[in-house]
Image: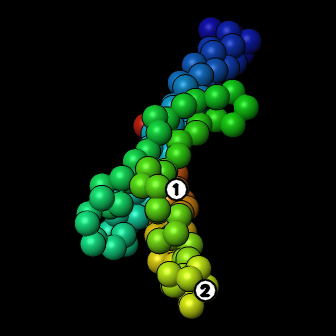
Amino acid sequence: MNNYQHNRAEIDKYRKELKAMVKDISAIDARILTIAVNKGMASAKRNTPTVTHFMKASWGVTPTKTTKRKGAEKSLYNGADYSSFVNDGHRKVNQAGETTGWVPGQHQLETAEKAVRRSLKQEFAKEIERVNKAHGK
Protein backbone atom coordinates (compact mmCIF):
# COMPACT_ATOMS: atom_id res chain seq x y z
CA MET A 1 0.00 0.00 0.00
CA ASN A 2 1.51 3.33 -1.03
CA ASN A 3 1.17 6.63 0.88
CA TYR A 4 -1.74 7.83 -1.24
CA GLN A 5 -3.76 4.67 -0.62
CA HIS A 6 -2.91 4.73 3.09
CA ASN A 7 -3.91 8.41 3.41
CA ARG A 8 -7.08 7.78 1.41
CA ALA A 9 -8.00 4.87 3.72
CA GLU A 10 -7.42 7.06 6.80
CA ILE A 11 -9.50 9.89 5.32
CA ASP A 12 -12.32 7.48 4.49
CA LYS A 13 -12.17 6.05 8.01
CA TYR A 14 -12.27 9.58 9.48
CA ARG A 15 -15.22 10.56 7.28
CA LYS A 16 -17.12 7.45 8.33
CA GLU A 17 -16.50 8.24 12.01
CA LEU A 18 -17.44 11.89 11.47
CA LYS A 19 -20.70 10.95 9.75
CA ALA A 20 -21.53 8.63 12.66
CA MET A 21 -20.73 11.39 15.14
CA VAL A 22 -22.81 13.97 13.27
CA LYS A 23 -25.75 11.57 13.27
CA ASP A 24 -25.33 11.15 17.04
CA ILE A 25 -24.93 14.90 17.57
CA SER A 26 -28.12 15.76 15.68
CA ALA A 27 -30.07 13.28 17.83
CA ILE A 28 -28.69 14.80 21.03
CA ASP A 29 -30.78 18.00 20.81
CA ALA A 30 -34.15 16.29 21.00
CA ARG A 31 -33.10 13.74 23.60
CA ILE A 32 -31.51 16.31 25.92
CA LEU A 33 -34.37 18.77 25.56
CA THR A 34 -36.90 16.07 26.43
CA ILE A 35 -34.97 15.09 29.57
CA ALA A 36 -34.47 18.70 30.65
CA VAL A 37 -38.06 19.83 30.13
CA ASN A 38 -39.36 16.74 31.93
CA LYS A 39 -37.14 17.66 34.90
CA GLY A 40 -38.54 21.18 34.70
CA MET A 41 -42.07 19.81 34.83
CA ALA A 42 -41.18 17.76 37.91
CA SER A 43 -39.84 20.94 39.52
CA ALA A 44 -43.00 22.89 38.62
CA LYS A 45 -45.23 20.17 40.07
CA ARG A 46 -43.16 20.03 43.26
CA ASN A 47 -43.50 23.79 43.74
CA THR A 48 -47.20 24.08 42.87
CA PRO A 49 -49.55 24.58 45.84
CA THR A 50 -51.96 21.72 46.38
CA VAL A 51 -55.25 23.21 47.52
CA THR A 52 -57.29 21.15 45.05
CA HIS A 53 -54.45 19.40 43.14
CA PHE A 54 -56.02 20.60 39.87
CA MET A 55 -53.26 23.06 39.03
CA LYS A 56 -50.55 20.54 39.91
CA ALA A 57 -52.20 17.97 37.62
CA SER A 58 -52.51 20.57 34.83
CA TRP A 59 -48.77 20.78 34.09
CA GLY A 60 -47.85 19.28 30.74
CA VAL A 61 -45.28 19.31 27.96
CA THR A 62 -45.62 19.47 24.20
CA PRO A 63 -44.04 16.76 22.05
CA THR A 64 -40.43 17.41 21.08
CA LYS A 65 -40.18 18.79 17.54
CA THR A 66 -36.97 18.90 15.56
CA THR A 67 -36.51 21.77 13.15
CA LYS A 68 -33.71 22.71 10.80
CA ARG A 69 -33.58 26.29 12.01
CA LYS A 70 -33.84 25.91 15.79
CA GLY A 71 -32.72 22.31 16.31
CA ALA A 72 -35.37 21.14 18.75
CA GLU A 73 -38.39 22.66 20.47
CA LYS A 74 -40.43 21.58 23.47
CA SER A 75 -42.66 23.59 25.80
CA LEU A 76 -43.80 23.33 29.39
CA TYR A 77 -47.27 24.66 30.14
CA ASN A 78 -50.05 24.69 32.68
CA GLY A 79 -53.61 24.37 31.39
CA ALA A 80 -55.33 25.62 34.54
CA ASP A 81 -56.96 28.93 33.63
CA TYR A 82 -55.84 30.54 36.90
CA SER A 83 -52.23 29.29 36.83
CA SER A 84 -50.78 32.64 35.71
CA PHE A 85 -52.35 34.34 38.75
CA VAL A 86 -50.82 31.80 41.13
CA ASN A 87 -47.46 32.01 39.34
CA ASP A 88 -47.25 35.79 38.88
CA GLY A 89 -49.37 37.07 41.77
CA HIS A 90 -52.65 38.96 41.73
CA ARG A 91 -54.51 41.72 43.45
CA LYS A 92 -57.15 41.15 46.12
CA VAL A 93 -60.49 42.80 45.42
CA ASN A 94 -63.39 43.32 47.82
CA GLN A 95 -67.05 42.99 46.86
CA ALA A 96 -67.16 46.67 45.93
CA GLY A 97 -64.46 46.07 43.32
CA GLU A 98 -61.79 47.94 45.26
CA THR A 99 -58.24 46.66 45.44
CA THR A 100 -57.45 45.70 49.01
CA GLY A 101 -54.07 44.09 48.65
CA TRP A 102 -51.71 41.89 46.67
CA VAL A 103 -51.08 38.15 46.75
CA PRO A 104 -47.46 37.50 45.76
CA GLY A 105 -46.74 35.00 43.01
CA GLN A 106 -45.28 31.57 43.71
CA HIS A 107 -43.10 31.58 40.53
CA GLN A 108 -43.27 27.86 39.77
CA LEU A 109 -42.61 28.46 36.07
CA GLU A 110 -39.47 30.50 36.72
CA THR A 111 -38.17 27.84 39.12
CA ALA A 112 -38.89 25.18 36.49
CA GLU A 113 -37.07 27.23 33.85
CA LYS A 114 -33.97 27.35 36.07
CA ALA A 115 -34.20 23.57 36.52
CA VAL A 116 -34.41 23.12 32.74
CA ARG A 117 -31.35 25.31 32.12
CA ARG A 118 -29.33 23.53 34.81
CA SER A 119 -30.36 20.15 33.43
CA LEU A 120 -29.52 21.15 29.84
CA LYS A 121 -25.94 21.93 30.84
CA GLN A 122 -25.54 18.68 32.78
CA GLU A 123 -27.18 16.48 30.15
CA PHE A 124 -25.24 18.03 27.25
CA ALA A 125 -21.98 17.41 29.10
CA LYS A 126 -22.99 13.76 29.67
CA GLU A 127 -23.99 13.31 26.02
CA ILE A 128 -20.80 14.87 24.68
CA GLU A 129 -18.77 12.57 26.90
CA ARG A 130 -20.83 9.56 25.75
CA VAL A 131 -20.42 10.41 22.05
CA ASN A 132 -16.69 11.04 22.45
CA LYS A 133 -16.27 7.75 24.33
CA ALA A 134 -18.28 5.88 21.68
CA HIS A 135 -16.01 7.25 18.98
CA GLY A 136 -12.74 6.79 20.85
CA LYS A 137 -12.10 10.47 21.52
Quarter of the figure with the N terminus: top right
Residue wearing tag 2: 99
Q: Residue at x 59, y 22 (%)?
A: 19
Q: Nearer the viewer, residue 32 or 55?
A: 55
Place of residue 116 in the rendered image (x, y in percent of width and height, measured from the top left): 50, 59
Give the CA separation, mark 1 to mark 2. Answer: 41 Å
Please tell me whether mark 2 sits on a helix, a strand or a loop.
strand
Q: Residue at x 49, y 50 (%)?
A: 76
Place of residue 49 in the rendered image (x, y in percent of width and height, measured from the top left): 33, 73
Binning the other alpha carbons within 10 Å of mark 1 as few (below 14), some (14 to 19) or many (20 upward) gives many
Image height of 76 relative to 46, above or below: above
Place of residue 120 in the rendered image (x, y in percent of width and height, measured from the top left): 52, 56
Q: Nearer the viewer, residue 65 or 137?
A: 65
Please tell me whether mark 1 sits on a helix, a strand or a loop.
helix
Binning the other alpha carbons within 10 Å of mark 2 as few (below 14), some (14 to 19) or many (20 upward) gives few
Q: Nearer the viewer, residue 95 or 61?
A: 95
The amino acid at mark 1 is: Leu
The amino acid at mark 2 is: Thr
Q: Residue at x 36, y 69 (%)?
A: 48
Q: Earlier in the sequence, mark 1 or mark 2?
A: 2
Residue wearing tag 1: 120
Q: Residue at x 43, y 59 (%)?
A: 40
